[in-house]
Image (cartoon, rainbow, N blue to C red):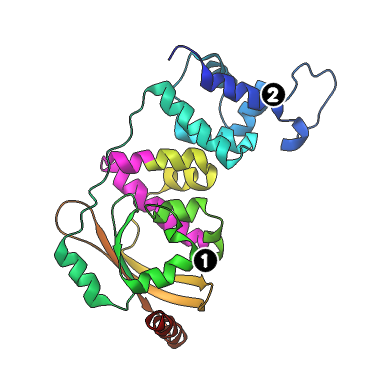
Amino acid sequence: MTENVLGRFLRARREAVTPGEVGLPAGPRRRTPGLRRGELAALAGISVEYLTRLERGSDRHPSAQVLGALADVLGLAPEERGHLHRLVKAGTGGACAATPARAVRPTVRSLLDRLEPTPAFVACAQGDILACTRGFRRLAAPAGLFDADPPNFPRFVFTDPRARTTFPEWERVADRHAAALRAAADLGDGGVAALAEELSITVGREFGIRFATAAALPAGFGDERWAHPDAGGLHLTYESLVLPGGDEHRLTAYLPADTATADALDALDAVGAAG
């Protein structure tokens, strides 16, 4: 690609943001219609020289973290962040990541059947839900996890506003999913790396910093609090197990951590059975 579409987009957005929108005084004799390069660079944590190279097209390979920081400062809307992500892919000739193995063995599906009505699911390293129990669908579908095709847990946590309502302790949940993606990306999983790049741009600092600073593997067990639209507050424990076979699939099962949660899950199961 010879045309510098990425640089043109960044410059246009920079010139459309007023100093007041980012907490800067307007000041006298401003010749720039929006932010100066130095102002945007300082707020995004990069050098003026690097921002100049991006806008002029002499550097067309910015990291997702840099683009996420620029998008944060420029106040890009979700659709603009998505467009920015596509511009980078077009400019670098990036190919789509390989589709992760989605086949779930019949024996694993039988295991899920035996776990009913326990909320349980099988996911690939990218977080796509490949198979699940009806109990898990009753738990997660009302929150919106299954609105996407395929449903993806990390993408839901970081991009769907309903996730912050679903998980009262959203920060803990977000840290865990970012750390899981970082661990898989560090092992060379191209699909996970592509998802992390996407989220670094489309979400920005809320994901990018977590991904960049994750230094430990997420625990394979623990507890989560859910705010279910029908069942109310739930306190769940979980176990997450790597399945044999080399596809990096994980089976995660949720169990009630207290009597009130057990009763609430039983009520959900009764409604599901009646329906």
Is residue 207 left or right of 15 when viewed as pictured?
Answer: left
Q: Residue furthest front?
A: 275
So how many labels did they put on this image? 2
Q: Amino acid at mark 1?
A: Thr
Q: Is residue 269 visible?
A: yes
Report x, y in % for residue 64: 46, 34
Residue 76 in magenta stretch: no
Mark 1 Cα shell of 10 Å, populated few (<14), some (14-19), many (≥20): many
Is residue 142 left or right of 244 when viewed as pictured?
Answer: right
- Rendered residue at 46%/48% (across/down): 210
- Whether 207 is drawn above or below 20: the answer is below
- Whether 56 is drawn above or below 143: the answer is above
Gap in Å between the C-alphas at discs 2 and 1?
38 Å
Q: Secondary structure beneath disc 2?
A: helix
Report x, y in % for residue 225: 48, 71
Picture quadrant of residue 189: top left
- Whether 187 is drawn above or below 39: the answer is below
Checking the image for residue 15, the label placed there is 2
Q: Residue furthest right?
A: 28
What is the quadrant of the N terminus in the image? top left
Q: Secondary structure beneath disc 1?
A: helix
Q: Residue furthest top?
A: 2
- Judging depth in this view, the residue of 176 and 193 nearest the camera is 193
Mark 2 Cα shell of 10 Å, populated few (<14), some (14-19), many (≥20): some
- Rendered residue at 42%/53% (across/down): 154
- Judging depth in this view, the residue of 6 and 257 nearest the camera is 6
- Judging depth in this view, the residue of 186 and 124 nearest the camera is 124
Task: Tell me the residue that label 1 is attached to.
Answer: 166
Q: Is residue 23 visible?
A: no
Instruction: Tell me which segment is drawn in magenta.
Output: 166-194
Report x, y in % for residue 115: 25, 76
Q: Amino acid at mark 2?
A: Glu
